[in-house]
Amino acid sequence: MVVKEINKYTKYGTSGKFGKFGGYYVPEPLIQPLRELIREYEKVKKNREFWRLYKSCLKEYAGRPTPLTLARNLTKISGGAEIYLKREDLLHGGAHKINNAIGQALLALKMGKNRIIAETGAGQHGTAVAMVGALFGLKTEIYMGAKDVERQNTNVFRMKLLGAKIHVVRESSMTLKEAINQALKDWVASFETTHYLIGSVVGPHPYPTIVRDFQSIIGQEVKKKMAHPDVLVACVGGGSNAIGFFHPFLDESVRLIGVEAGGDGKKGAATLCEGEKGVFHGMYSYFLQHDGQICETHSIAAGLDYPGVGPELAFLKECGRMEVVSVCDKDALKAFHLLSRLEGIIPALESSHALYYALKLAKSMGNNEKVVICLSGRGDKDLEMVIGSGNMK
Ligand SMILES: *Cc1c(COP(=O)(O)O)cnc(C)c1O
C-alpha cells in the first residue's frame, strides 16, 4: 500500500498538524473519504444552526451542563488546595464519550449519511455510538475484537439492546487495534453512505480536531463557572477528555497535567511518558513500540489501554504546555475507594488515575489554590474488575 503524507506544515491546529504531529498518513483509498470529511466539517464549523442543535441535544438527551462539584471531604483530608470535580460521570451513558458521539452523529446526518460505524475496545465508545444511532435513526455497526467481546459481555449486550450490529474481529491481536483496522476497511468500501465515528482524538486528520471540538464543551463549562483555576488534571487514554477539558484554557496561566496509565509494573499504557514517535493508525504521534512493532499494553482501566495518543497531546507535551505523569493500577484503585467512601461518588477507573495524582498534588498546594479534576466517567462499569482485583476490603 502506498502511504502518502499530504499535509503541508502549516499553522498549529489549522490543517491537522500540531507542530509536527498529526497529519493523515493513510493508504490511498482513504484519502477521498477524509477529504470529504474535511470539506464538510469546515462548512459545519461555521454553521450556527448546527452548533445550536448540538448544544440542545447535549442538554435534552445527555444531561449537560454537568456540575462542577467542590469535593469538601477530600479537600479537608488533603489539607491543601481546594479540590473540584467536573462531573462527566453524570452524563447519559456514564462518561464524556456521548459529547463526541452526538456531535459526529449530527455531522453524519448533515453529510447525508444513513449509516455509522465505529470501533470499540471495552465497549464504552461502542455503547455511546449505539445510543446516538438509535436516537437519530442511523444504521449502526460496531467493530470489536473477539478478546474484548469475551471480556466485556455486558457492553456487547447493551449495544445489541440499542439496536447495533456487532462485528466480532478475529484477525491478529483480536483487540481494539485490529478493530480499528477492520472499521477503516469497511469505510473505504462504504463511505458514500457511511460515516466512521472515531471515539477519541486519534487517527488521521480531521478526526483529532473534530473530536476535540466536540469535547471542548467540558472546558468551556468549567471556564464559565470558575475564572482562575490553578491546576487542571485529566486522565489520558487517546486523550479526548483531557484535550476537551484543557483546550479552552490553553492560553491561560493554569497548569495542565495529563495522567497516563502506569499499569502493573510489567506492562502499562503510558504512551507520552514512555513511548517513541512514529506513524500508526494514520497519525504521527507517540506510540509504545519496540523494534518497529506496536506493543501490547495493559491497564486496569480499559479506556486507557491503547498504545497511542492523540497528536495534539503529543504536541502540548513536546512544547512544554502540558505536564505528563503516570499512575499505576494499584494507586488508581486507592483513589477509586477513597472517592467512593469520602464523597459518595464511584469514579471510573480511568478517572481514578487523574484523581490519585491530583490528591497528591493538592496536599502540596496552598488553601487559596484550586485543583480541578475531570471526572470522565462513573465506575459502575468497573465493579467486576475491582472485585476481581481482590481489592474489596
Ligand atoms: C474512554 C474513556 C477514557 C479514555 O478516553 P480519552 O479519549 O483519553 O478521554 C477515559 N475515561 C472514561 C470514563 C472513558 O470511558
Image (spheres, helix red, strand yellow):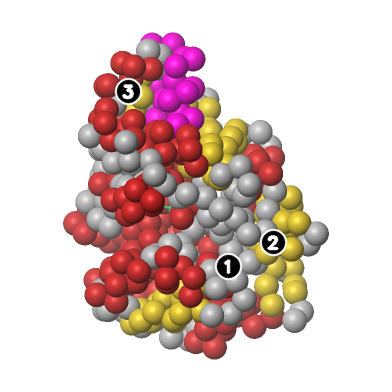
> Which amino acid type is marked by label 1?
Lys
**Residue at mark 2 to residue at mark 3: CA–CA distance:** 39 Å
Magenta stretch holds residue 368: yes
Q: Which residue appears at 69% of the width and 40% of the height?
A: 318
Query: Which residue extends farthest left?
Result: 60
Q: Residue 347 in the image: x percent, y percent?
A: 33, 42
Check disc 1 and report its element: helix, strand or loop: helix
Specify the label residue 294 is tagged with: 2
Q: Are marks 2 and 1 in contact (CB under 8 Å)?
A: yes
Residue 116 visible in the picture = yes
Give the answer, above or below, for where 260 lies relative to 112.
Answer: above
Q: Would you name the residue on which mark 1 appears?
A: 177
Q: Residues within 10 Å of mark 1 (few under 14, many from 20)?
A: many
Magenta region: which residues?
Answer: 354-376
Residue 88, magenta (yes or no): no
Identified at 19% across, 57% down, the residue is: 60
Which residue is tagged 3?
74
